[in-house]
Image (cartoon, rainbow, N blue to C red):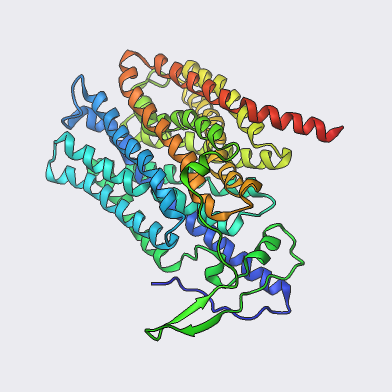
Amino acid sequence: MEPAAAPASPASPDGGHAAGTVRRRQYAALGLTFAAYAAFHASRKPPSIVKAVLSAEWAPFTGPEGTHHLGELDVAFLAAYAAAMFAAGHLADRADLRVLLGAAMLASGAASAALGAAYFLGVHSLPFFLAAQVASGVVQSAGWPCVVAVVGNWFGHASRRGTIMGVWNSHTSVGNIAGSVLAAAVLEFGWGWSFLVPAFVIAALGGVVLVFLVAHPGDAGFDLEAMEVEMSGDGGEEVELLVEDKKEDDDGELELEMGSQLPRAIGFLEAWRLPGVAEYAFCLFFSKLVAYTFLYWLPFYIRNNAVAGQFLSHKASGILSIVFDIGGVLGGISAGFLSDAIGARAITSALFLLLSIPALILYRTFGSISMHHNIALMFISGYFVNGPYSLITTAVATDLGTQDAIKGNSRALATVSAIIDGTGSVGAALGPLLTGYISTRGWNSVFFMLIVSISLALVFLIRIARGEIVAKIGARR
């Protein structure tokens, strides 16, 4: 089933009207992919919200080994996600993005619903929970390469890519917030509902994507070269529509012959050798380790650490944890805006990473004094931790996937973004797993691990940031 799209027509002499049509298509693609990936993240939040409940009353997560099993549950999802991500990016460069994304969302809803069903069926088997998490990780891995490729198709040559991507990538935090609120709101009715409600949301949105998403300008009849003019911000230039030649095939069906051929998809190893890909991938490994440790363990941490001498309820802990994500929304947007303003992605990422170290120290040291201290310091931590993570997974990945070394080949986008996010997801799997074990020794040890990880992320950016500084100094001479 093809998405609903306006039929192509010859270029209108009214360039403003054509440009307006392009912008509407761009915003529609941006909005649908935003909602789609927000739904992916919302469906990942229930495990963190129900952790405290599972550790208190649901075998096999009770007892002294309970936190270890909870950490294993996180790593089952994230390891499967990371391993499948590399193949998913390769597939997304070759498959129909609309169909692949919609199918992944429907399958993700089914996997999340299976976890919720365990509550109603009284399942206490650790292998069942692990298998469901592995299945969820595999199907969710297709989401990120698809949405990045779609946005890259429509905005790959935009002059303010960092700002656009920074705003768009707030879907991560918006999804986390929505998932936390939904899961916490129904937790009192049984933890199974915390999985079922987000499962329904992502499945419903998957149906919307299958019907309405237009994944590529060519699918809507827009000339790819003219799109580059529009995306560069030259609104006075006319955006031409493709004149489609139609012919009958052997079955009597009409086939559309596009005015230009799409570039070939690049290979996996070829993408790894692109300038900057390896450095940013390993930087994201450690950056995402920190971000996902908060994603999966922050509600549990809040529940088990008194604020102003009082322990919060399971529901209140889940709701309070969204402050970190609210900070992440603003951090991602700010990082994108700043990187556009100074024209330096690595310097911006390094600055945010550097400032996140004192932010985490302050949150751990003074966050328990009062609720006001806790909220303010959690917000600041989210702002600096999620800023570089957001920038690297979006604007940087798009920069690297359309750089001059591959002559702006937009079909490299999914592969490059999958390499960067897949490598980051290995770190995302490691962080929650280590937290499950290290937290038994005390939370100071966990925060020490996070600070070391941030420091290592900075190390991988040194060469690129130094190059940006040298280029800036040279440009002023």
Which of these two is toward me, 149 or 35? 149
- In the rendered view, would you say 385 is above or below 196? above
Q: Nearer the viewer, residue 472 or 290?
A: 472
Residue 238's spot in the image, x, y percent?
72, 71
Residue 170 on image: x %, y %: 52, 45
Question: Which quarter of the rendering shows the N terminus?
Answer: bottom left
Quadrant of residue 261 within the rendered picture: bottom right
Above or below 258: residue 53 = above
Is 2 situated above or below 435?
A: below
Residue 240 location, quadrant:
bottom right
- Given residues 169 and 46, the one toward you in this image is 169
Q: Is residue 295 above or below residue 358?
A: below
Count of numbered circles on the image: 0
Q: Is residue 341 left or right of residue 142?
A: right
Residue 183 lies, in percent from the top left, at: 33, 43
Image position of 462 (left or right of 250) = right
Q: Nearer the viewer, residue 367 or 109?
A: 109
Instruction: Identify the residue at horizontal 17%, vertical 32% (top origin).
Output: 58
Q: Is residue 11 left or right of residue 395?
A: right
Residue 163 appears in view = no
Furthest residue to the right?
477
Residue pictured at 41% horizontal, 43% vertical? 86
Residue 123 visible here? yes
